[in-house]
Amino acid sequence: MFAYYLDLALRSLKRNKALTGLMILTIGFGVAASMTTWSVFRAVSGDPIPWKSSKLYVPQIDAWGPTVQKNNPDPEKGPPDALTYGDAVGLMRDHRGKLQSAMYMLSPSVVPAKVGEHPFNTMGHAVFSEFFPMVDVPFKYGSGWSAADDESRAQVAVISSKVNRRVFGGGDSVGKTINIDGHDYRVVGVMGEWNPQPRFYDVVNTGGFLSQDEGVLLPFNTTIAADMSNDGNTNCSEAPKETGFVGLQRSSCIWIEYMVQLDSAADAQRFKDYLEGFARQRYPGWAPNVRLRGLMAWLDHEHVVPPDTRISLYVALGLLLVCLVNTAGLLLAKFLRRSSEIGVRRALGASRREIYTQFLIEAGMVGLAGGALGLLLTWLGIVGVGWVLPRDIADLARLDVSLFATTLAVAIVATMLAGLYPTMRAAAVQPAWQLKSN
């Protein structure tokens, strides 16, 4: 029977090609608009490390006090988004988390091993050894450095596959020497392809999204000793009393990011209690003002999802709703125009259920055709989304298998839902009235 209903639906759709084409265009444009914006929203709002995000936390400590907080636009008067150098070093020294790392952004110059090639700048971070297992950095060759290397300020480095290809031509470069900012470092690891989006471990400096991957990761204590300056944000409540990089370390300026792994809610509460005691000891002049946010709460607090993408999604969903209402109206007009046909079929023994089936299949075929058109328009939309959104965000949109299937499913299901009311009206036609009127 399905093949029979399918044949009837095809004949009906061919009977009025203009109306059929209009419905397909309406569904196609509505679905494409919603799926294009959904692809961007899905990319920027997704969990960057779903298997571990519930265990990762970001601590905050108010190092400036209530006097400065009077001018804080945050209604909660929460602490700053980063830590001072002194606070970060103190937290690392006490080591109350399972894994933890202070970090700051670098933009060092790398000198290729080949003679005649020019140095190039790359993005990187100064981190501690526990950073690698904490955020699950993948390795192609080697591994991260050890805690002993942290303590001894070892001249070691972890580099990206891209830097490895550019400096060493690819292959296993573990044990080789790389020149970074005029200093020689021994390569201990080469990362695999790794560019998490959003850049969850340092959203303050990156905004969450960067197309450029991490080029180098260096030991925190080593970069401090080498006076490798911070290339990220630095905020001060007052000017440092001493000049230079050492003056920044001794000031109340905030520029260090921090992340800690806590495996249970009890561990998180103990760390929060410790954080309050730490702040009370460090800043006895005011009540402790601290926060310990889980990773997803932290991303939300930092407004990692751009407002434009959220608004665009709502507008696109509204457009899809308008398109569905229009399609429902067109289907209603099309179905009721066939009242005589329905009356004859009912008089010959067709049940209302069979009428429902026939017209819903017809609506589903319109949805399928609209979904096919929507796929093409979605691909065009993803290609052109860079015209209205920043490139780092637009590049995240992908027409993958899941989006392909979702687009078709949304088109078919939405059209069939839009066809429910027209189908109910068509099935309610009284055969006696139609036969009498004819």
Image (cartoon, grey):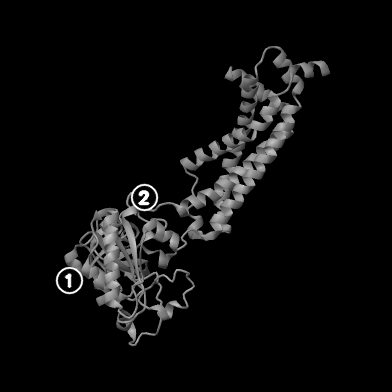
C-alpha separation, residue under disc 1 versus residue under disc 2: 34 Å
* Residue 59 position in % (x across, y down): 33, 66
Q: Give the amino acid at mark 2.
A: Pro
Q: Is residue 203 left or right of residue 184?
A: right
Residue 395 place in picture, x, y as percent: 49, 55
Crowding around mark 1 (Cα neighbors within 10 Å: few <14, some 14 to 19, many 20+) is few
- Relative to 229, does residue 390 appear above or below in the rendering? above
Q: Going 18% across and 70% down the picture, which residue do you hit?
A: 151
Crowdedness of circle 2 by 10 Å Cα count: few (<14), some, many (20+)? few
Instruction: Give residue 262's position: percent from left, percent from top.
Output: 28, 57
Identify the amino acid type marked 1: Ser
What residue is rendered at 34% in x and 53% in y?
Answer: 54
Q: Single out the residue that lies furthest toward the top.
A: 348
Quick one: SS at disc 2? loop
Q: Quadrant of the C terminus?
A: top right
Task: Give the numbered dot on residue 152.
Answer: 1
Q: Residue at x 56, y 59 (%)?
A: 308
Query: Can residue 50 be seen here?
Result: yes
Identify the disc placed on residue 79.
none
The residue where tag 2 is placed is 50
- Residue sticking out furthest to the right: 437
Q: Earlier in the sequence, mark 1 or mark 2?
A: 2
Which quadrant of the rendered structure holds the N terminus? top right
Front: mark 1 or 2: 2
Residue placed most toward the observer, 358 or 186: 358
> Under tag 1, what secondary structure?
helix
Q: Are marks 1 and 2 in contact (CB under 8 Å)?
A: no
Q: How many marks?
A: 2
For this orientation, the residue located farthest to the front is 287
Relative to residue 365, is residue 378 depicted above or below?
below
